[in-house]
Image (spheres, rainbow, N blue to C red):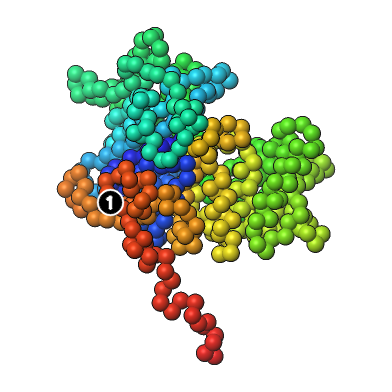
Amino acid sequence: MLTRLEVDGFKNLLGLSVDLGSFTCIAGVNGTGKSNLFDAVQFLSLLADQSMMEAAQQVRGVHGERLGDPRDLFWNGYASGSHVMRFAAEMIVPAEVEDDFGRQAKPTTTFLRYELELGYEPPRGVERIGRLALRHESLRHIKQGDAHAHLRFPHSVKNFRSRVVLGRRAGKAFISTAPSPEGEPIVSIHQDGSRGQLEPTAASRARATVVSTVTSSGNPTILAARREMQAWRRLALEPSALRSSDSYTAPRELMPDGLHLPATLFRIAHDTLGADISEQVYARVAGRLGDLSGVSVRSVEVLQDDVRQLFTVQLHEADGMVLPARSLSEGTLRFLALCVLLEDHQVRGLLCMEEPENGIHPANLSAMVDLVRDLTVDVSSEPGEDNPFRQVLVNTHSPGVVQLVPKDDLLFADSAVVRAADGSLARSLRLRPLAGSWRARHGSGDYLTMADILPYLTAPVGAQLSLPWEAA
C-alpha cells in the first residue's frame, strides 16, 4: 500500500507531496498534469523490475508519446544545466513474499520509506541519447511507534494498523547511499539481521536500481519492497483487448489493457473445485453487472470451446438473448472487467485508473463509483482473503463523479506557478483537499471549500437549456 508519495523534478511535478488512503480520487480539468502523477507511480513500479533506461522508455513523454529520450521525464529536460528528479515513497509491504526461486521470505518490518534520486548524463562517443544516472537510493524502516503520524487516513488501529504494520528494525537502513572519499555516491545493501552487509557499489556504474536487483530471500525486506512496487499497476482497459477470446494456454491474469479477461474469470470461478462455487462467482459478477441501468443480465459465464480450445465470456440477457463479449458496449466491458477484478483475491497492491467513467452513461456513474470504491481494502477490518489488500487511485474531470465521492477521498488538481531549485519559474501540478477532510486537518492549511469548487460542479450558463435543432 502506497501511503505517501513525494516527487520533485519529474515532468511538471515540483515539490509535490500527497498522502494516500485506500481510495483517492483526483479531480480537475484537462491539462493540469493529473496523469503525470500516474506516470510517476508507474515509473517507480517499472524501476523495481527493469533497468532505468527500459523503465524510462515505457513511460509517456511530455507530449503523451514514448520517445526513448530520458530528458523527456525531467521538468527541464531540454534546458541547459543539470537535471535531477527525486522520489520518496512510504509503503506498507506484504508480510510474506516469494522470491524468484519459489522460496518464502518474511521482511524484518513492513512499513518502509524508499527514496530515489536520478540524474542525467549526456551521450558520449557514438551514443545519440544520454542515460539516467543513479545518484541516491535508500530504504529504511518507519518505527511502529511513529506509524500513527504517517498513516493519517481514518482506519482501525486494532483491526488494520496492528495487522499490517509489523516487525522491528534497529540500526542501519536496508539500503543506504554515502559519498566515497572522491565524492562519488556509493550504494550499500545492509542485510536483515546481523549478518553484516554486502560490498558497496558505485552508483555511477549502476544500470538499474538496487531494489530491482534483489531476487532472492537473502534480503527479504528489500524483496518485499520490490514486490510491493511491482504490484503498482496502471489500468488502461481497451475495448479491443476486452473483447478478445483466450486460448486454453493463455495467462490467467488480467493485463493492464484488459487482455485475458475470459481466462481470468475462468480461473477465479474454478480456483475451488465444485460447480456450486463457479456458479456463485458467475452469479456475483452478473449481479454486479446488473447494477447498470439499461443492461438486463440474467447470467454471465465463460464458454469453453474444446474444438478451438478457446475461452469466451458470454452474457445471457433476461429476454433470452446470448451476447458474446465482442457485442458489448465499451462502458459495459470496462464495468465487467472491474467486476472480475473485484472477485480476484489474488490482485493486490495499487490500481491506478484514469477516468473510469469513460463510456458510462451518466445514470450509471453511481454504480461505477461504488464498484471502484468496493475494490479497495476495508481499513476498518483486517485484510485477508475476504478483504484483499488493494488500493485504488483514480483521476477524473467529471463533475458527476466528484459529487459521488466522499470529501475525505477527494483531491482537486490545478496548476500553480512555483520557483524551481535553479530559480526559474515553472507551472507545477498542485493537489488540494477539501476543508474538513483528513488531509486538510493534517496538512499545511492549503485546502478548498465547497464555495471554491462550486464553479467546477455547476454547468455552464445556458447548458442543457436548449437543443441545437429547436430553432429549426
Residue 441 percent across, percent down from the top left: 32, 45
**Up-down relation of residue 191 to residue 346 (above or below):** above
Relative placement, left or right, of 130 versus 362 is: left
295 or 205: nearer the eye?
295
Residue 333 percent across, percent down from the top left: 64, 54
The residue lying furthest to the bottom in this view is 472
In this figure, what is the number of numbered marks?
Answer: 1
Q: Which residue is mark 1?
A: 446
Can residue 126 be seen at all in this image of the molecule?
Answer: no
Q: Residue at x 76, y 58 (%)?
A: 317
Can residue 1 be seen at all in this image of the molecule?
Answer: yes
**Residue 119 figure quarter:** top left
**Residue 291 figure quarter:** bottom right
Q: Residue at x 54, y 32 (%)?
A: 382
The residue lying furthest to the left in this view is 423
Residue 266 percent across, percent down from the top left: 72, 40
161 or 101: nearer the eye?
161
